[in-house]
Image: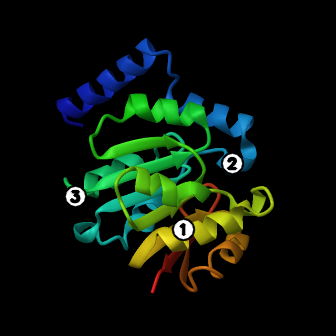
Amino acid sequence: MPVSTLATRRQRRQLRQAAGVPSPWSMFLKGFFKHPVMVGALVPSSNALVRRMLSRVDWANTKLFVEYGPGVGTFCRAILDALPADASYIAIDTNEDFIRYLRHDIVDPRFSAVLGSAADVMRIVADHGHDKADYVLSGLPFSTLPAGVGDAIGQATADVLRPGGAFLVYQYSPKCRDFIEPYIPKVEHAMEWWNVPPAQLYWAWKE
C-alpha cells in the first residue's frame, strides 16, 4: 500500500478521534443495534458487491450520483474514485451518527452528506442546484420500512432520475422489487454470492 494512502487514512483516523467520532466498525454496529430496521445487515457490503453493483454505471456521463443509506461509506470511496471531477455525489441518511461520521471522514468538494429522508430526494437534489440525478444507489431494507415509506421512495426516485438513468438497489429480500417495478418497470436482476448474506442486485432503468 502506498505511503500516501496510509498517511491519508492515518490523518482521517486522527481527525475522527479528535472530534470524538468512533471507528467505522463501531459506527456500523452502533447503527445496526440502534436502528436495525434502517440498516438491514450486521456487516458492511463486500468489495465484490460494491464492484458489481457499480459496474453498469456510465461514469463519463454522470453529473449527479445519489446514495440512500450510505452508512459508514462502504460505497463512497469507490464512487468518488470513479466520479468525474466536475460531478457531484449526495449521500442521504436518516441516521445522524452516520452523517456526522461521513462529514468527518470524507473531505471532497464533490461530496455532500445530508441528514434527511430518501423520500425527499427531489427537494434535496434541488437544494444542491440540480434538476435530475443520473444514478441513485440504495441499500435501504425496503421490506422492513414503515408502511408507505418504500412506495414514497420508489415514486420519488422515479421522479428524480433523468431518462436513461438508473436506480441501483442491493437487498437481502426479493420483496424490494415490489417497491421498484411499479415506478421503474425495466428491472434487471442478479445475485452476488460473495457477500454476507448473499445479496439481491437490481438495476432499474428509467426509459
Mark 2 element type: helix
Q: Position of residue 9 (x, y in %)?
A: 32, 29
168 relative to 94, above or below: below
Mark 3 element type: loop
Q: Quadrant of the N terminus?
A: top left
> Which residue carries the number 3 mark?
84
The numbered disc on residue 17 is none
The numbered disc on residue 38 is 2
Q: Residue at x 62, y 56 (%)?
A: 140
Counting residues from the start of the chain, the first of labels 1 and 3 encountered is: 3
Do tag 1 and tag 3 residues touch (Cβ < 8 Å)? no
Q: Give, as a three-letter code, the residue at label 3.
A: Pro
5 relative to 70, above or below: above
Point out the frontmost of discs 2 and 1.
Answer: 1
Q: Give, as a three-letter code, the residue at label 1.
A: Thr
Q: Is residue 72 left or right of residue 61?
A: right
Point out the frontmost of discs 1 and 3.
Answer: 1
Q: Residue at x 68, y 58 (%)?
A: 141
Q: Nearer the viewer, residue 2 or 29?
A: 29
> Which residue carries the number 1 mark?
157
Asked whether residue 31 is in view, the answer is yes
Counting residues from the start of the chain, the first of labels 2 and 1 encountered is: 2
Quick one: which residue is furthest to the top in this view?
A: 18
Q: Residues within 10 Å of mark 1 (few under 14, many from 20)?
A: many
Q: Is residue 80 left or right of residue 146?
A: left
Q: Nearer the viewer, residue 115 or 41?
A: 115
Q: Residue at x 35, y 70 (%)?
A: 57
